[in-house]
């Protein structure tokens, strides 16, 4: 893989620019150089790589992660952040990696930001969450 800037100036190969890519993406240079295999990174590490990213559509954050996790899921545009929940459901089926559950609770009133309705019935209070994260953030 070769990298070029916006003026088509050659920057280098992936191994040559791995340190700069690590600074931008948060993905350890050893993975980018091939010194470590992506399959050895735990779910939480891969989620961390995606944290803070933005996409044009809410569901695209989940769809952009399918290859990273080697998970197959049919895109359903219009489902919003429900796509991220489906991704986590698929990960539950495919892996025994408990780091999927290693996420920090979002702040108060984050439910509105993620489109999660307060529970009117059941054991959860309005600002309580389940086992799965609402986003990779």
Image (tube, rainbow, N blue to C red):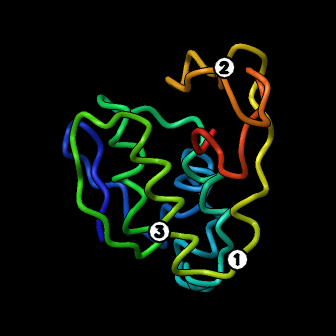
Number of the label disc, if any, that sits on residue 82: none
Q: Residues within 10 Å of mark 2 (few under 14, many from 20)?
A: few
Image quadrant of residue 98?
bottom right
**Residue 64 image offset from top left, x and y in percent:** 36, 53
Q: Is 69 situated left or right of 119 in this image? A: left
- Going from the N terminus, do you reach mark 1 or mark 2 first? 1
- Going from the N terminus, do you reach mark 3 or mark 2 first? 3
Circle 3 sits on which residue? 90
Q: Is mark 1 on a helix, strand or loop?
A: loop
Q: Is mark 3 on a helix, strand or loop?
A: helix
Q: Residues within 10 Å of mark 1 (few under 14, many from 20)?
A: few
Number of the label disc, if any, that sits on residue 97: 1
Which numbered mark, 1 or 3, is in the foreground of this view? 3
Q: Specify the farthest residue to the front.
A: 121
- Going from the N terminus, do you reach mark 1 or mark 3 first? 3
**Residue 39 image offset from top left, x and y in percent:** 56, 83
Q: Is mark 2 on a helix, strand or loop?
A: helix
Q: How crowded is mark 3: few (under 14 residues within 10 Å), some or many (20 or more)?
A: some
Q: Is 113 situated left or right of 11 in this image? A: right
Whole-number angstrom distance, CA of label 1 to CA of label 2: 26 Å
Whole-number angstrom distance, CA of label 1 to CA of label 3: 12 Å
Q: Is 56 situated left or right of 132 in this image? A: left
**Residue 54 image offset from top left, x and y in percent:** 44, 32
Give the residue displayed 72% in from the left and 52% down from the top. Answer: 131
Pick the front one: 77 or 33: 77
Number of the label disc, if any, that sits on residue 110: 2
């Amino acid at each position: 893989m070769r990298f070029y800037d916006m003026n088509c100036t050659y920057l280098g190969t992936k191994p040559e620019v791995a340190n700069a890519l690590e600074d931008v993406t948060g993905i350890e240079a050893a993975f980018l150089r091939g010194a470590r295999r992506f399959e050895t990174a735990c779910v939480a590490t891969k989620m961390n790589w995606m944290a803070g990213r933005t996409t044009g559509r809410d569901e695209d954050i989940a769809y952009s992660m399918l290859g990273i996790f080697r998970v197959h899921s049919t895109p359903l545009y219009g489902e919003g952040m429900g796509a991220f929940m489906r991704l986590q459901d698929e990960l539950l089926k495919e892996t025994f990696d408990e780091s999927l559950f290693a996420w920090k609770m979002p702040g108060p009133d984050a439910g509105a930001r993620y489109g999660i309705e307060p529970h009117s019935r059941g054991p959860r209070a309005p600002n309580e969450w389940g086992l799965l994260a609402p986003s990779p953030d």
